[in-house]
Amino acid sequence: MNITSEQPKIIVVGSSSIDLVLNTEHLPKPNETVMAEKSESFFGGKGANQAVGTARLGASVYFIGCVGMDPYGQQILRNLVDEGVNVGYVAENEETATGTAYVTSAHGVNTIVVVPASNYCMTVSHVSEAEKLFPTVDLVLIQLEIPMEVVDFTFDLALNNGKKVGIYASPAKKLSPKIIQNASFIVAKSNELSIVFGDEQREDILRKYPNKLFVRDDSNSTTYFNGSEMKYYRNDHDSMLHKMGMGDAFTSGFAVALCHGNSVDECVQFGNDVSLKVAKNRGSQSGLPFLKDFSPE
């Protein structure tokens, strides 16, 4: 893994939220009431996770998103600023609440209900206000917790400026052929491939998109096709108990490694290493590693 002296510039367009986590002995069944051992709150949202993730790995990051004008929104903005993320293009909407996610967690298994709220109030105008940034950056990251018209507009804007675009296709939605063809890389969950790409066998889908599609699962494994053979990279650990935010962490590591000119294999390995560190800590953002946490080879 090579980290150059240049600081990558990255735009992240996506969601932010407060994650409210209930820790239980087991996940409730239909019509069952369970007692929570404790409740916790964390900063989350796939966009904010990737903004913090790439910033901690040494990138100069601009976040484009939308929060409510409520205490949660102010907490999110302060946290992003503390993490070194530029929030000059985060809109504040007084008519809706900040996004939240309600998580029930039992022995490393999570059930999650997301309330998009202000994240679904994002419009193309929010992104167009930051149009002048796009020619200056190295990479644009997008996820799917925001309206698809915003995703499509952002992608076109990045493409028209000749920029690399990374897509984390979660929560799973069908991607347009234009995005699939022109994205620099796409990260997807193994159990959601059919939603994103249609009903084909996993290996058939992977073979269509060599060195572009990276399929992830909960064991911190990444599968991809390099043009000649199927590649499989996995690293996990007994202490890998907290699986929230692993996909965002992988995407952040992959993106930063790509900006530094590393090979696809090296990008995958670094993404997995970043993801593994998140899985050892609670919270999608709190466990994200800093560049200094990785010893030079």
Image (cartoon, grey):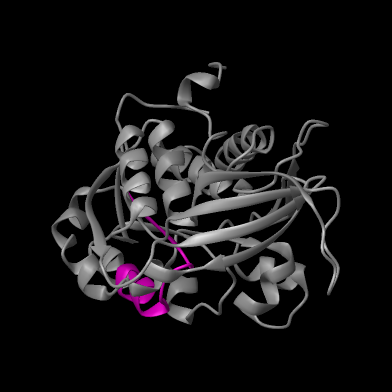
User: Is 2 located above or below residue 147 in the figure?
Assistant: above
- Residue at image position (42%, 77%) is 148
Q: Residue farthest to the top?
A: 296
Q: Residue, x 38% and y 30% (percent of image)? A: 58
Quarter of the image where the C terminus is located: top right
In front: 188, or 96? 96
Q: Left or right: where does residue 157 sit relative to residue 139?
A: left
- Residue 131 in percent (x, y) is at 17, 62
Residue 39 point in image, percent of width and height: 65, 45
Asked whether residue 141 is drawn in magenta, I would say yes
- The reply to whether residue 217 is in sight is no
Asked if residue 166 lies in the magenta stretch, the reply is no
Expressed as whole percent of the image width and height from the top left, the position of residue 59 reads 35, 36
Q: Which residues are magenta?
A: 139-155
Q: Position of residue 224 (x, y in %)?
A: 67, 56
Q: Is residue 13 left or right of residue 114?
A: left
Does residue 93 appear to the left or right of 97 in the view shown? left
Looking at the rendering, which quadrant does residue 149 occupy?
A: bottom left
Q: Is residue 152 left or right of residue 20?
A: left
Q: Would residue 119 be visible to someone looking at this image? A: yes
Residue depicted at x 78% and y 31%: 239
> In the picture shown, does residue 115 fall above or below 166?
below
Tell me: residue 90, above or below residue 159: above
